[in-house]
Amino acid sequence: MSATEQLSIRVEPTQQSRLSQVDFNNLVFGKIMSDHMLVAEYNDGEWIDVSILPYGDLTVNPSMSALHYGQAIFEGIKGYKFADGTVSIFRPEKNWERFNKSASRLQMPEVPEEIFLGGLKKLLDVDRNWVPSKEGTSLYIRPFMFATEAALGVHPSISYKFIIITCPVGAYYSKPISLKVETHYTRAAEGGVGFSKNAGNYALSLYPTKLANDEGYDQIMWTDANEHRYIEEAGTANLIFRIGDTIITPHGDTILHGVTRRTIMELAEKWGYKAEQRKVSVQELIDGIENGTVSEAFAAGTAATITHISRIGFEGRDYTLPPVEGREFSNKVLSYLNDLRYGKIEDPFGWNYIV
Ligand code: COI
């Protein structure tokens, strides 16, 4: 990192801002990118250049190893604007930590704090007018890294690009979602890369998700690779349930350790709920829905925020969750986190990282 400490972040401002073309009242997730992006280059053991550039196309070599062998990882973070104009990022240091865990597993270099968090802060400062302020909107932040060495031998790339792009967004899911329990296809096995946020984990979800969509479900609920008995996560977010008075989320290294999931479990504990990270079998969930002990089920993620689950399909039968209005815990968390992220209440945990 010593070389990085001397690296300054060069800013090349855009000559043609696209900000005035954006309809902030109709934001679609992930379609319109902000004016600038951060681009850092790594070569042969060191970070050699970090710049903030106008958002635009990249030139890639066709033999670039990310395209062939999949060394590609990413994160999802959100930035918010307070009523007084303050721009704040939600717990980005947790994403930085997870990013570097993903990097290590895929034999990619770690990104130093100065580049990941320092670069993020500077990028949001440059594009602060892109952070929307209306409740329910935010600036979605997508840091990612991929291998750029032009070589077809299977080995860790010698060079990488780390990039951060951002986009103003509305809700990823605008209503409660239905999930189909996946009992054939597998997302991750023990010893695999389930905990890492790598591009391949999403590529492999597309086909089973399409099959679930064809059957009328919004998403899939992954189960364990060995027996398809235990719940893991949904295609785009972690899962949390309320069974009796306990808030429960599946755990283990085959699932993504989400920052939103972690935040919610921390809040549950703080508020005096019993909070457990443990195996949850599909049967336990289904029995609980049938006998009324499962009162809440939701997806939790940066993009998904908290998305209520309305219906779960398992082995050809549908199980309907109780009405959303009566879901005491998830509604309380949702409104608390909104208030905290938009700076309406005090931040006792230091979760808001002010730009
Ligand atoms: C996120 O929640 O930020 C994610 O990366 C999920 C993605 C599938 C939109």
Image: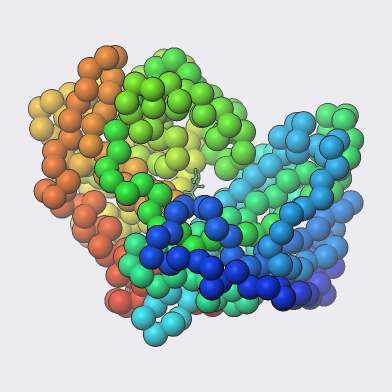
Compared with residue 351, is residue 242 higher up or lower down, i.e. above or below?
Answer: above
> Left or right: 259 with respect to 110?
left
Where in the figure is residue 151, as x and y percent of width and height? 89, 35
Q: Classify residue 183 by image quadrant.
A: top left
For the N terminus, give its image quadrant. bottom right
Query: Which residue appears at 68% of the width and 62% of the height?
Result: 55
> Left or right: 8 with respect to 166?
right
Compared with residue 91, is residue 285 higher up or lower down, i.e. above or below?
Answer: above
Where in the figure is residue 272, as x and y percent of width and height? 21, 57
**Between 352 and 28, which is closer to the camera in this rendering?**
28
Query: Which residue appears at 32% of the width and 49% of the height?
Result: 174
> Left or right: 31 with respect to 144?
left
Q: How many marks?
A: 0
Query: Which residue appears at 88% of the width and 29% of the height?
Result: 153
**Any part of residue 240 in sight:** no
**Between 250 and 69, which is closer to the camera in this rendering?**
69
Residue extending furthest front? 21
Where in the figure is residue 77, as x and y percent of width and height? 51, 58
Compared with residue 175, is residue 211 higher up or lower down, i.e. above or below?
Answer: above
Query: Which residue appears at 58% of the width and 55% of the height?
Result: 142
Where in the figure is residue 348, as x and y percent of width and height? 35, 74
For the C terminus, give its image quadrant. bottom right
Q: Classify residue 50 by image quadrant.
A: bottom right
**Any part of residue 38 in sight:** yes
**Between 344 and 188, which is closer to the camera in this rendering?**
344
Colouring scheme, one of rainbow, by chain, secondary structure, one colour:
rainbow
**Between 56 and 179, which is closer to the camera in this rendering?**
56
